[in-house]
Image (cartoon, rainbow, N blue to C red):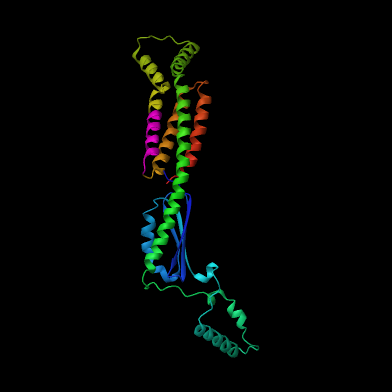
C-alpha cells in the first residue's frame, strides 16, 4: 500500500562542472496530476519526464522540480566568469549609459555580484550524457519519493487493519442482540394491534403478509452478512500490491450504507450506541483512505 504523500530528492555531478538536482513531492488527489518545473533548455524532455513519472505514480498531485548549477554554486570555491563574455557585459553597460545620458562609471563590482554572471551556462541538451543524467536523477528522486510514500502507506495499512478489527468486534456485539430485534418487532406489532383493539384472524392471508413484511423489515441479517463480506474484501485489498485507494473508498461507503440501514431497521436501544461507535470508527477510516494511492 502506498500513501499519496511523500518526498524524494537526488542530485548528480556532470563532468565535474555541473550539478543537476531533482526534487519530487506529492500530496493526495483523486487523479494523477504532474506539475513540472524544469530549465527551459531541457523542456524538450518534458514528455520523457512525464512518461517516467507515470511509471512510479498512479494518483496524487506530483511536483517535480529540476535545477542545474555550476559546481562553484555548491560551495566548492569561487569560479570567475568567462573573461570575453564579462568584457561584453561591461561594454554593453557602458553603451547603455551613453544612450540614456547617464553619468558616472560602470560599477564592475556590482556586475560581479550578479549571480548569473558567475555561473556556468547550462550544458547543452545535445551534449553527450546530459539527457541520460537528467532522466537518471529524476528517476532516483521518484524512487526516493515512492519509498517515502511506501513507508507512510505501511503505517496506514497497520492502522486500517486495527480499525477493521474494531469494527468486527462492534459487529459481533450487535449480532448478539439480533434475537432481541426480531422479538422487539413482534412486540411492537402486538402492542399496536392491542392499542387499536383490532379483531385479527390469525389465518387471514392479508394479516400474515403484513406480519411477514414487518418481520423482514426488522431483520438485519442481510446487512450483517454484507458487512462481514466487506471486511474480508477490505483486508484482501490491504494485502495486495496494486493501488487500492479507490476500491477502499468504495468499500467504506458501502459499509457506511449497510450500518446505517442496520441502525434504522433495528430500532433497539441496546444496539444504537454500538452503531454510533461503529460509524465513528468507520468515518476515521474514510478520512485516512483519502491519502491512499
Residue 206, horizontal then vertical, whole percent: 36, 16
Magenta-highlighted stretch: main secondary structure?
A: helix
Is 214 covered by the magenta stretch? no
Is 237 covered by the magenta stretch? yes
The boundaries of the magenta stretch are: 226-241
Residue 43 sits in quarter: bottom left
Residue 257, horizontal then vertical, whole percent: 43, 33
Residue 60 in sight: no
Residue 108, horizontal then vertical, whole percent: 60, 83
Residue 14 in sight: yes
Name above or below for residue 119 compared with residue 211.
below
Nearest the camera: 256 or 109? 109
Residue 258 sits in quarter: top left
Name above or below for residue 99 compared with residue 194.
below
Residue 152, horizontal then vertical, whole percent: 47, 45
Give me the residue at 40% from left, 37% from top: 251
Nearest the camera: 151 or 288? 151
Amino acid at each position: 500500500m502506498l500513501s499519496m504523500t511523500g518526498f524524494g530528492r537526488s542530485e548528480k555531478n556532470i563532468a565535474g562542472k555541473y550539478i543537476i538536482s531533482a526534487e519530487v513531492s506529492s500530496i493526495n488527489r483523486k487523479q494523477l496530476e504532474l506539475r513540472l518545473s524544469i530549465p527551459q533548455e531541457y523542456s524538450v524532455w518534458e514528455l520523457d519526464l512525464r512518461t517516467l513519472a507515470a511509471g512510479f505514480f498512479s494518483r496524487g498531485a506530483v511536483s517535480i522540480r529540476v535545477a542545474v548549477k555550476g559546481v562553484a554554486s555548491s560551495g566548492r570555491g569561487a569560479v570567475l566568469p568567462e573573461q570575453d563574455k564579462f568584457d561584453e557585459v561591461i561594454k554593453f553597460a557602458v553603451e547603455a549609459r551613453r544612450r540614456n545620458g547617464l553619468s558616472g562609471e560602470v560599477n564592475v563590482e556590482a556586475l560581479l555580484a550578479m549571480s548569473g554572471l558567475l555561473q556556468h551556462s547550462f550544458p547543452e541538451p545535445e551534449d553527450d550524457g546530459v539527457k541520460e543524467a537528467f532522466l537518471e536523477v529524476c528517476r532516483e528522486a521518484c524512487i526516493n519519493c515512492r519509498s517515502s510514500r511506501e513507508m507512510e502507506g505501511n503505517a496506514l495499512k497497520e492502522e486500517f487493519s486495527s480499525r477493521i478489527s474494531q469494527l468486527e468486534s462492534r459487529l459481533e456485539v450487535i449480532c448478539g442482540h439480533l434475537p432481541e430485534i426480531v422479538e422487539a418487532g413482534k412486540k411492537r406489532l402486538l402492542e399496536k394491534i392491542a392499542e387499536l383493539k383490532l379483531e385479527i384472524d390469525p389465518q387471514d392471508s392479508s394479516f400474515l403478509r403484513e406480519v411477514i413484511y414487518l418481520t423482514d423489515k426488522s431483520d438485519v441479517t442481510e446487512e450483517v452478512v454484507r458487512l462481514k463480506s466487506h471486511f474480508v474484501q477490505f483486508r484482501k485489498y490491504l494485502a495486495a500490491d496494486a493501488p487500492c485507494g479507490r476500491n477502499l473508498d468504495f468499500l467504506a461507503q458501502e459499509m457506511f450504507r449497510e450500518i446505517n440501514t442496520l441502525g434504522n431497521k433495528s430500532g433497539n436501544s441496546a444496539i444504537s450506541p454500538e452503531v454510533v461507535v461503529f460509524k465513528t470508527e468507520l468515518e476515521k477510516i474514510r478520512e485516512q483512505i483519502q491519502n491512499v494511492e
